[in-house]
């Protein structure tokens, strides 16, 4: 009778030990889950940053399509363009 109880207790302890080992060292271990959570948080931050960049580009596109003064400013400053018959003076340092 006592022998059966010892066998059951040993089997239960072995099962518990294997479950704990699986939690620590297994494929879905706690350290691995934490690493995956950290990666998800990092990717989420990257997504939010890229969405802000996209929104900025959308606003720039909208201004270029609808704001003629802004478009003229960009053409003059970035590309050095001028209107027909207009003289452009460039200051040299």
Image (cartoon, helix red, strand yellow):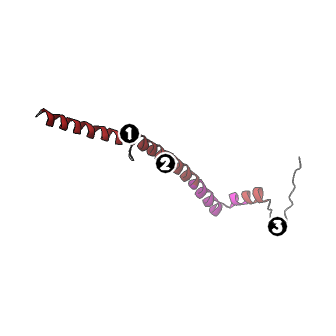
Q: Which residue lies furthest to the right in this view?
A: 92
Q: Residue 44 carries which label?
A: 2
Classed neighbour count for the residue bearing mark 2: other residues with Cα under 10 Å, few (<14), some (14–19), many (≥20): few
Q: Quadrant of residue 65?
A: bottom right
Q: Name the residue tied to disc 1.
A: 24
Q: Is 6 in front, or is 12?
A: 6
Q: Is residue 33 above or below residue 72?
A: above
Q: In this view, does 46 lie to the left or right of 60?
A: left
Classed neighbour count for the residue bearing mark 1: other residues with Cα under 10 Å, few (<14), some (14–19), many (≥20): some
Q: Are marks 1 and 2 in contact (CB under 8 Å)?
A: no
Q: Is 43 in front, or is 22?
A: 22
| Measured Cα–Cα span from mark 3 to mark 1 | 75 Å
Q: In this view, does 81 lie above or below 36?
A: below
Q: Which residue is drawn at 52% across and 49% down?
A: 48
Chain part drawn in magenta: 54-72
Q: Residue 84 carries which label?
A: 3
Q: In this view, does 17 lie to the left or right of 45?
A: left
Q: Which residue lies furthest to the bottom in this view?
A: 84
| Measured Cα–Cα span from mark 1 to mark 2 | 27 Å
Disc on the earlier residue, 1 or 2: 1
Q: Are marks 3 and 1 in contact (CB under 8 Å)?
A: no
Q: Residue at x 80, y 64 (%)?
A: 83
Disc on the earlier residue, 3 or 1: 1
Disc on the earlier residue, 2 or 3: 2
Q: Residue furthest left?
A: 1
Q: Quadrant of the N terminus?
A: top left
Tell me, yes or no, whether the highlighted magenta stretch contains residue 66.
yes
Q: Quadrant of residue 85?
A: bottom right
Q: Quadrant of residue 61?
A: bottom right
**Image location (x, y in percent) of residue 77:** 76, 55
């Amino acid at each position: 009778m006592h022998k059966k109880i010892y066998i059951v207790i040993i089997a239960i302890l072995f099962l518990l030990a294997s479950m704990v080992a699986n939690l620590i060292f297994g494929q879905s271990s706690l350290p691995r889950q934490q690493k995956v959570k950290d990666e998800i948080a990092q990717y989420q931050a990257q997504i939010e940053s890229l969405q802000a960049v996209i929104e900025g580009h959308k606003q720039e596109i909208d201004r270029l399509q609808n704001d003629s003064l802004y478009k003229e400013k960009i053409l003059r400053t970035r590309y050095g363009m001028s209107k027909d018959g207009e003289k452009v003076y460039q200051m040299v340092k």
